[in-house]
Image (spheres, helix red, strand yellow):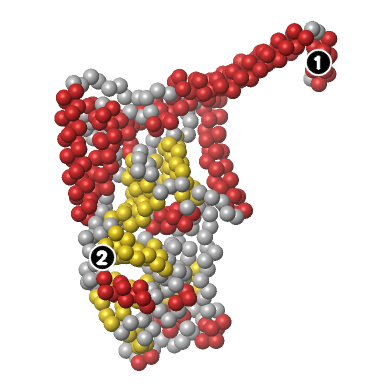
Amino acid sequence: MKKGVLIFIPLLIFWVIWLTWRALAPANSLKKLEQFALSTSDAAYDSIYSHPDLIEITREAQFKRSLLALKKDSIHLIVDLKDSMVGLYINGVIIHRIKPDTYYLDPVLSNLSNRAYMSLFGPIIPISTDTASIVKEPVVVRQAPKDTIEAALNAYKPDTLMQNPAFWLIQLPGEIDLVFSQATDKTQLDTEVRDQFNEFIRSWYHGESLSRFLHLSKSTSPVQILVSMPVDDLRAIYRALPENGKLVLRY
Amino acid sequence: MIDFLKSEWNKIRVTSKFTVILTISVLLLIIFFLFFYPNIVRKMTLKPQGQFPGYDASAVILEKAKISADIQQLDKQLSNKVPKSFYMVINTSSNEFYLYKNTELVKRDKCSTGSYVLLKNGDNQEWMFKTPKGEFKIRNKNTSPVWKKPDWAFVEEGLRVPSPNHSSRFEYGVLGDYSLSLGQGYLIHGTLYQRFLGLPVTHGCVRLNDENLELIYKKMAIGSKVFIF
């Protein structure tokens, strides 16, 4: 009995320490994000905007100001979780509007102060780091035929099958991940790509987490915004955006 | 380890019922604790940030009115940007077009856009058949348009490229009854291959069926906006 207790108790203590360390991660992430937001903020912020009655309207005003400030000759991405809308925007016109099937906002972001929110999400956000399973331009290379016979033999058949599964991760300032995914998986390939994509994100987080634990650093958790929508819409949005596109986000 | 557990289990078996119940209860309690503990800690530690300093109610009401007025102004500026008259939106991924009048959707149907074929003629020449994206305007409108075939149209068919104004360059009736120019050689026009509507098959132009082409021709004035994504 004593041997069992000797093994069991240290294991239990270790397990409780690990759980505590992990459980503190959201709070640590929130503090880290607050510090980051306030250190990068250069806009004047009146503390009265933190009044509960003003939070929502200050965010709405800032969102609209940012829309108006977007470059006129380019297509931009807008994510308005407040109105449950993801869309493409160009020069004042929302040219494509989708209601996401589902979305998830990390509790860390819900608890962010309005000052930090305005610093992080108030300005136009550059999409500088992203990764996607979608082909940006589904180019088909063809060699010119030598004569009319070869041209007739190689007549181009439109390839509608170039529609690979759609998953897209955008890294926002403050190590926030905005993850778009197709709402449903119809094929085996869809499921496989979804698993690979999730594994790609998970392995990065787990590696980071373990490294922090071993270095006795404070734990942090991934801060995510997850949006799922129909696959065709996601593909259209991804392909429409230019390289280094811009994003305006509100929640 | 297994032998040890076995012996422990034998010991438990012979002990009183009370000890067994107590052991199971303790284990269940530990499991229960471990299951809910992280959530409890998370809830206790994750608290809304940003302490609100005290302001009197009138200051808040004043500020609220000011921001609401700002929002109204911003809404006005945003709605002024949406064309009042007809405009078109073309989705090159789904090969669909939308005809709007201000915020009202007038028509939605299939179209055909660029195939994304990169045609290579040896090492010297190549053409990419894609529909450009962004904001465009109708620059010109024509009835019974004639297609002046560019070089790639001959290369693609395995034909010798003729001189710039050779008669073989001019084709009648292949673009439908109307064409609307978006500039840089890109047109909205009709097609003989209506079965391909809804598919990415063009050389960059936007193809519509006869009925939609007529509607677009009549509704879209020169200067009307076309948004392509």
Looking at the rendered structure, whether the residues under marks 2 and 1 are on a common chain is answered as: yes
Can residue A32 be seen in the rendering of this structure?
no
Above or below residue A146? Residue A13 is above
What residue lies at 58% left-to-right and 54% top-to-bottom?
A186
Q: Position of residue B1 (x, y in %)?
A: 79, 20
Q: Quadrant of the N terminus of chain A?
A: top right
User: Mark 2 or 1, which is nearer the eye?
Assistant: 2
Which corner quadrant of the image does residue A207 belong to? Answer: top right
The residue where tag 1 is placed is B9
The residue where tag 2 is placed is B86
Does the residue at mark 2 contact the one at mark 1 (Cβ under 8 Å)?
no
What residue lies at 53% left-to-right and 30% top-to-bottom?
A209
Kind of residue sitting beneath label 2 = Phe
Kind of residue sitting beneath label 1 = Trp
Earlier in the chain: of badge 2 and badge 1, it is 1
Judged left or right of residue A28, residue A197 is: right
Mark 2, secondary structure of its residue: strand
Which corner quadrant of the image does residue B166 belong to? Answer: bottom left
Judged left or right of residue B74, residue A195 is: right
Residue nearest the viewer, comparing A247 with A234: A234
Pinpoint the chain carrying mark 1: B
What residue lies at 35% left-to-right and 92% top-to-bottom?
B167
Pinpoint the chain carrying mark 2: B
